[in-house]
Image (cartoon, rainbow, N blue to C red):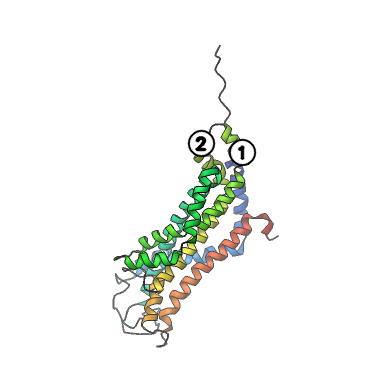
Amino acid sequence: MSTRPDPAPEAPSAQAPVAGAGRESLHYAVRNPKLIIGAGVVAVLLAIGLLGPTLLDNGSPNEYVGPQAAAPDGTYWMGTTTFGQDVYAQFVHGLRATFLVGVVGGAIAAVIAMLVGFLAGYRGGVVDEILNMLTNVVLVIPALAVLLIINAYLGVRSVAVQGLFIGLTSWPWAARAIRAQTFSLRTREFVDLARLSGSGTWRIVFREIAPNMSSYLFMTFILLFGGSILIASSLDFIGLGPTEGVSLGLMLQSAQQWSALQLGMWWWFVPPGAGITAIVGALYVANVGLDEVFNPKLRES
């Protein structure tokens, strides 16, 4: 007869309740007008940015293809610039670049925030103090000033590089919020059971804690996504955007530089301004809708 002790029972995972909550959230999501409208606007603009450039005849959005300073007509839907560039071609390419910098910057910031926030909140002690000190240091550094200096000294700036630096400087507030949520979840019974079963730190974090914060993490990414777009547009407008290609912020910068407002060329600066406003505004509305979906106290009857 074997005298070996029976293996410790595996801790029940929190994924089953989360799956049930996910189905309930989906039920309310398809009935939330704020979420539907916000997500719909973002989806339409994303489709234009992805498909629009493939439907254009000209290769580069900065080519001189038409008459100078022409108003919108059947040939040039959004008119042309002072130099005869097609504003519509620049707009659809700019949408793609704007979404790209938002995804890159938001994703990098979200990953760093989750790693720092989860580790600090779960481990606590000296680890928490060190990571919290690092977060506070990055938090008090003027991120925009750092980005200005970095972009000014970079010889060649791309959308991806811009998104990288934005992501590396915009994660601290999200890390602190995730740390607070993790700190409150680490004392729950299912986490204690997972710890007793011998699960490691990251296994507990990603199998027990993270699923219970999935809605919060998704909403955090949306905010980081929108914030990256605003920061990138600000850099573009002051002339520190990508040196190659075009973005909505660069369109605004060019329109301002060549006096489009004074010349009455509204078709040059209105589309990019409206595009940035629509993307960020729709993300905010969708985030409010998600908050109502995930928070039962905010759901409309």
Q: Are marks 2 and 1 in contact (CB under 8 Å)?
A: no
Which of the pair 77/21 is nearer the observer? Answer: 21
- Residue 79 in sight: no
Q: Distance between the Cα atoms at labels 2 and 1?
A: 14 Å
Which of the pair 168/84 is nearer the observer? Answer: 168
- Residue 283 in sight: yes
Which of the pair 125/214 is nearer the observer? Answer: 125
Label ID, residue 200: 2
Q: Tell me if 89 is positioned left or right of 280 in this view.
A: left
Q: Tell me if 11 is positioned left or right of 93 in this view.
A: right
Q: Position of residue 112 (x, y in %)?
A: 46, 52
Label ID, residue 190: 1
Question: To which quarter of the image does residue 2 belong?
Answer: top right
Q: Position of residue 138 (x, y in %)?
A: 47, 58
Who's the residue at 43% across and 71% down the image? 234
Question: To which quarter of the image does residue 7 belong?
Answer: top right
Vertical position of residue 19 compared to residue 239: above or below: above
Vertical position of residue 70 compared to residue 47: above or below: below
Residue type of the residue flagged with mark 2? Gly
Which of the pair 75/131 is nearer the observer? Answer: 131
Q: Residue furthest top?
A: 1
Q: Tell me if 301 is positioned left or right of 38 in this view.
A: right
